Image (cartoon, rainbow, N blue to C red):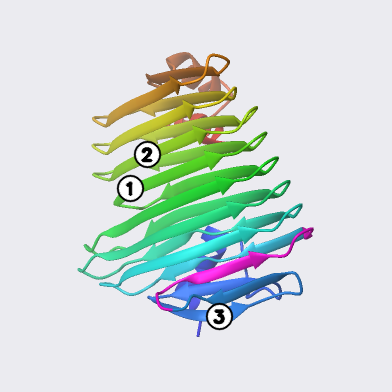
Amino acid sequence: MLNAVDKGLLETVADLYKIPSGAFSLRKNGSGLFINSSENVTVKAKEGQPGIDVIVKPGTKNESIHIPVIISQSGIKDMVYNTIEIGEGADVVLVAGCGIHNSGSEASQHDGVHNIIIKKGARLRYIEKHYGEGNGSGGKILNPQTVVEIHEGGIGEFEMVQIGGVDSTHRVTEAKLGKRAKLVIKERLMTHGEQEAFSDIKIELNGEEALADVISRSVAKHTSSQVFRAQVIARSAGRGHVECDSIIMDSAKISSIPEIRAEHPEAELTHEAAIGKISGEQIIKLMSLGLSEEEAVKVVIEGFLR
């Protein structure tokens, strides 16, 4: 059922070389292809609409869950609704992401709404990679919406990466944090050609001592465009920080719009943003070590996005 293209996409977005034996779901070209549960993690098809439910038992430790999506046909338009519940005291890793291979003339698109609930004292490391490839004229479009609820003492660590090749994306992330809840979002993005990327993040610190940290790194090349908006609202004595740094090249365009809002006298919120070009001194130094200018630029970008 998986051809060479499928396997390549799966490896790129989920670091998988074969179908794993644990909790797993693979969606291909708009349909569920594989689904499997483990002793502590239930993965099942959602009733009444496309998507899956992932339920992690309380206290589950050291378990990885993979839920990738791949599209290898031109003209596919896919939409899913996923619900992910991490039980109290659990500590797990969830690897999501979507890869599109489009060699045709029609656009291929995957949109997803992911509702994630992290229960009291639980910890989730969430990794989502987006990638596009193929030499067709059809677009590769990805629009994820992630809605997160973190209960008392819960921790969410979110790594959101757009590796390359995606023509258009609009990522929406919304989160509500309870007492002593913590959310860290690390976003890495690179656009080139005429690609467009929008990222909208809204975090509400509703419980005392809630903590949010948003870090965005992006590179825009050629005539691509990026818009980054991040809003942190503190309705309690919580702490939040937004940091967005971008490298702009060629004729690209970047907008960075961090916003912080305090609605409690003991809230502590900070933000910083920077957009600039690659330093000539960095390039010269690397070229003095034997690299070509192109190689030096690549090294700087890779280090910046790491």
Alpha carbon distance from label 1 to label 2: 8 Å
Percent from the top left, x then y, of residue 260? 43, 22
Mark 1, Cα crowd under 10 Å, few <14 / some 14-19 / many 20+, is some
| Nearer to us in this view, 19 or 121 | 121
Secondary structure beneath label 2: strand
Whether residue 293 can be seen here: no
Secondary structure beneath label 3: strand
Q: Is label 2 or label 3 in front? A: 2
Q: Amino acid at mark 2?
A: Asp
Residue at image location 45% in from the left, 61% down from the top: 98
Circle 3 is placed at which residue position? Answer: 34
Percent from the top left, x then y, of residue 11? 56, 64
**What label does residue 170 carry, if any?**
1
Circle 2 is placed at which residue position? Answer: 200
> Could you tell whether 64 is left or right of 281 in the image?
right
Mark 3, Cα crowd under 10 Å, few <14 / some 14-19 / many 20+, is few
Residue at image location 42% in from the left, 20% down from the top: 273
Mark 2, Cα crowd under 10 Å, few <14 / some 14-19 / many 20+, is some
Question: Could you tell me which quadrant the C terminus lies in?
Answer: top right
Q: Amino acid at mark 3?
A: Phe
294 w.r.t. 128: above or below: above
Q: Earlier in the sequence, mark 1 or mark 2?
A: 1
Asked which quadrant contains residue 157, the reply is top right
Residue at image location 60% in from the left, 51% down from the top: 126
Q: Which range is magenta?
A: 48-61
Whether residue 250 can be seen here: yes
Q: Amino acid at mark 1?
A: His
243 w.r.t. 9: above or below: above
Q: Is label 1 or label 2 in front? A: 2
Confirm or deny contact between disc 1 and disc 2 (CB under 8 A): yes
147 falls in the magenta region? no
